[in-house]
Image: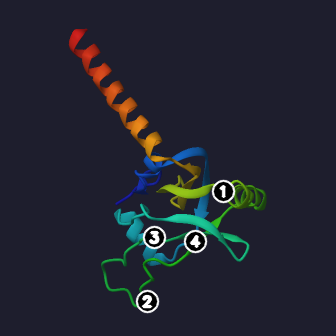
Amino acid sequence: MVLPGHVAAQNRRARHEYFIVSEVEAGIMLVGTEVKSLRVGKGNINEAFAGPMQGELFLFNAYIPEYQSKMPFPHETRRPRKLLLHKREMAKLMSAITKDGMTLVPLDIHFGQRGIAKIQLGLAKGKKLHDKREAIKERDWNRDKARLMRDKG
């Protein structure tokens, strides 16, 4: 059971695949069985992305499985889900997507203090292969450096 303030689904590969320029928190329109599945901790946003559709922002390709108990009206697992943002925020993000060639990637889905599902979106620019290798080298060096300092000190 996911409590308010805790992460229900996380996209751990997003920070490896993209440079995150800025982060935005948005509401997400879900049906009841989707909320129940997320509260249990099921859901996958690793291959998901957000984009414009009919003048609104939607979350595409996010997988939220059907709730395990037999509900009379199960939801579609990979349907587009509407994101709830202020008009000014939405306009800013849409212009960044269309003009600057950036991408909106979901970083995590969590429940706010009042128990409402929220999604953390990152405005991102894709990394090249050499950037990924450089980040891995830096991470390994920091790990080795910390290990050396711990062993010495």
Q: CA distance from mark 3 to mark 4?
A: 10 Å
- Amino acid residing under circle 1: Gly
- Amino acid residing under circle 3: Val
Q: Count residues near mark 4 (Cα–Cα under 10 Å), then give few for <14, some for 14-19, many for 20+.
A: some
Dots 4, 1 in contact, CB < 8 A: no
Q: Count residues near mark 1 (Cα–Cα under 10 Å), then give few for <14, some for 14-19, many for 20+.
A: few
Residue 73: give its label: 2
Specify whether 21 is left or right of 48: right
Point out the tag, 2 or 1, that comes first from the N-terminus. 2
- Amino acid residing under circle 2: Phe
Residue drawn at x 28%, y 14% is 149
Tell me the element at label 1.
loop
Picture coordinates of residue 74, whole percent (x, y): 41, 86
Check the image and report above or below for 40 versus 75. Answer: above
Dots 3, 2 in contact, CB < 8 A: no
User: Which quadrant would the N terminus be assigned to in this image?
Assistant: bottom left
Picture coordinates of residue 3, whole percent (x, y): 41, 55
Residue 26: give its label: none
Point out the tag, 4 or 1, that comes first from the N-terminus. 4
Q: Which residue is mark 1?
A: 101
Q: Which residue is mark 3?
A: 35
Q: CA distance from mark 4 to mark 1?
A: 26 Å
Picture coordinates of residue 92, whole percent (x, y): 75, 55
Specify whether 146 is left or right of 89: left
Tell me the element at label 4.
loop
Point out the tag, 1 or 3, that comes first from the N-terminus. 3
User: Which quadrant would the C terminus be assigned to in this image?
Assistant: top left
